[in-house]
């Protein structure tokens, strides 16, 4: 256990050895000797167990006038592991070689990673029928986890929780936000919701599929024939979504991705300046469409690993040293992306969640949207399109405002732009694809500091 802990990493005493549930694989949460890390399982439903891992920041200066910020990171997929990918590949204290990460988001907040939904990463079910089928079901499980973790610790109850999501995790974030607010108002959940940040998130599938062809045509990556076919399929997807035929829309989405792939000589959906590797596209013609899509979605993991610092093998790490440290049950095998979890949500995958964003804005929740310039799957063009559909009464003022440039580390090179009005904030991040914290770590870290408004030390 001590091999994975930075010496002197924390100066704080954080007592959290309390029973979280009965009948789960562990009767109490585990922690490091200095209390800087705490983790455990929550039985969110009978025979369904969700894993969480909490890091307390050594950089935060305790300020009695403001709550301590805690970031809950939600990975995409559905079925991608936040405990593994978000933690070791993007924003956690260590990279996948167990070396300190200079751009860790711990510099501005405590971090809470969760393998969500159940069946993802270290989270597991005893019966596959318990996989969630909708974003709302996932939100209910996550709310149960928050109740178990926060309600049993007064220190966390005084903190401010920021839900930060990437990719499909954005749909889980907004449904969780509403579910958590409802539980708070009912007195069932003891926490303060500081805000929600949506990073390259799959909020409106319709707007994204309509953006792919025109965006790729503008950057000379697709020809006229490919553009025409992509528009035809996007229209078909829209009709299916409007009719509530979400499974059919998922199938058509897969068909559109195949058209894009064939028409662009395999553009990388996570950075349109790149090609997908031959390994990620080694598919046979006999595979069924949903099997093809699950294999294609493994790019979510593989694309990130090709860009992350270090060359460590995350699968070996998570199923070896980290699994041993965390005392994960022997029968639980960690995977970066769970195919069964993805498949279980195919009926909700193409459902938009714009209304949920609207409802959160109307409730006064701080919403931050950030997007990488080079992302295709959740393109900035598509994100801007769904933002313009919001019914929030501050939208027109927000859209009319000029953007402000973003710089980093005293450099004069423009790294992005930002715009804010009331509780809506938008960051356009240049030079980044789908994985903003990996591609532009300095900009991402500064953005997190602005979101959390934390008081930190200079170390």
Image (cartoon, rainbow, N blue to C red):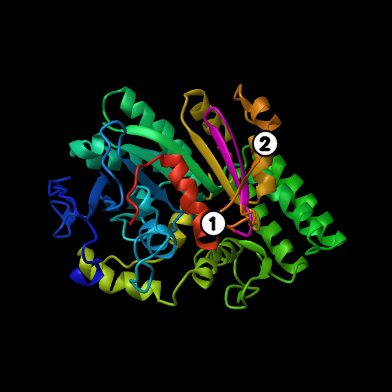
Instruction: Judge whether residue 420 is colored magenta.
Output: yes
Picture coordinates of residue 408 (x, y %)?
54, 55
Along the viewing direction, whichever of 131 and 373 lies nearer the viewer? 373
For the residues marked 2 and 1, what is the alpha-carbon distance in whole angstroms?
A: 31 Å
View extreme (right): residue: 224
Residue occupied by mark 1: 436
User: Secondary structure beneath disc 2?
Assistant: helix
Are the residues at dot 2 and dot 1 in contact (C-beta closer than 8 Å)? no
Mark yes or no: residue 169 visible. Answer: no
Picture coordinates of residue 285 (x, y %)?
65, 73
Question: Which residue is at 54% across, 27% downward?
Answer: 422
Q: Give the main secondary structure of the magenta stretch.
A: strand
In the picture, the disc for residue 201 is none
- On-image quarter of the C terminus: bottom left
The answer to whether residue 94 is left or right of residue 103 is left
Mark yes or no: residue 199 visible. Answer: yes
Residue occupied by mark 2: 242
**What range is drawn magenta here?**
416-432
Instruction: Judge whether residue 77 is colored magenta.
Output: no
Q: Can you say whether 374 is above or below 169 in the image?
A: below
């Amino acid at each position: 256990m001590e091999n994975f802990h930075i010496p002197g990493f924390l100066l704080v005493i954080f007592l959290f050895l309390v029973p979280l549930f009965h009948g789960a694989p562990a009767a109490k949460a585990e922690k490091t000797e200095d209390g800087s890390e705490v983790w455990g399982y929550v039985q969110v439903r009978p025979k369904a167990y969700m894993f969480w891992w909490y890091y307390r920041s050594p950089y935060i200066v305790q300020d009695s006038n403001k709550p301590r910020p805690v970031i809950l990171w939600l990975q995409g997929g559905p079925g991608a592991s936040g405990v593994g990918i978000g933690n070791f590949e993007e924003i956690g204290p260590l990279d996948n070689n167990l070396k300190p990460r200079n751009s860790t988001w711990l510099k501005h907040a405590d971090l809470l990673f969760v393998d969500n939904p159940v069946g993802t990463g270290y989270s597991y079910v005893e019966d596959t029928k318990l996989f969630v089928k909708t974003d709302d079901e996932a939100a209910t499980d996550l709310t149960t986890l928050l109740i178990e973790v926060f309600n049993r610790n007064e220190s966390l109850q005084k903190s401010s929780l920021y839900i930060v999501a990437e990719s499909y995790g954005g749909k889980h974030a907004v449904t969780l936000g509403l579910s958590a607010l409802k539980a708070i108002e009912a007195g069932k959940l003891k926490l303060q919701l500081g805000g929600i940040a949506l990073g390259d998130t799959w909020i409106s599938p319709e707007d994204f599929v309509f953006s792919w062809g025109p965006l790729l045509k503008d950057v000379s990556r697709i020809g006229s024939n490919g553009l025409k076919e992509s528009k035809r399929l996007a229209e078909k997807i829209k009709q299916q979504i409007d009719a509530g035929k979400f499974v059919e829309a998922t199938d058509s989405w897969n068909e559109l991705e195949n058209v894009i792939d064939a028409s662009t000589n395999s553009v990388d959906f996570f950075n349109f300046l790149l090609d997908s590797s031959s390994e990620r596209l080694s598919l046979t013609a006999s595979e069924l469409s949903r099997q093809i899509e699950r294999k294609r979605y493994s790019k979510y993991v593989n694309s990130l690993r090709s860009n992350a610092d270090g060359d460590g093998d995350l699968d070996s790490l998570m199923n070896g040293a980290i699994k041993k440290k965390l005392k994960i049950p022997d029968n639980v095998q960690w995977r970066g992306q769970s195919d069964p979890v993805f498949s279980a949500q195919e009926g909700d995958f193409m459902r938009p969640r714009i209304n949920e964003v609207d409802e959160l804005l109307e409730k006064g929740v701080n919403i931050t949207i950030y997007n990488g310039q080079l992302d295709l799957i959740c393109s900035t063009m598509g994100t801007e399109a769904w933002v313009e559909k919001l019914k929030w009464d501050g939208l027109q003022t927000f859209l009319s405002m000029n953007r402000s440039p973003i710089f980093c580390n005293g450099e004069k090179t423009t790294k992005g732009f930002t715009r804010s009005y009331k509780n809506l904030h938008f960051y356009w991040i240049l030079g980044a694809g789908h994985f903003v914290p990996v591609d532009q770590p300095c900009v991402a870290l500064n953005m997190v500091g602005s979101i959390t408004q934390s008081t930190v030390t200079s170390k």
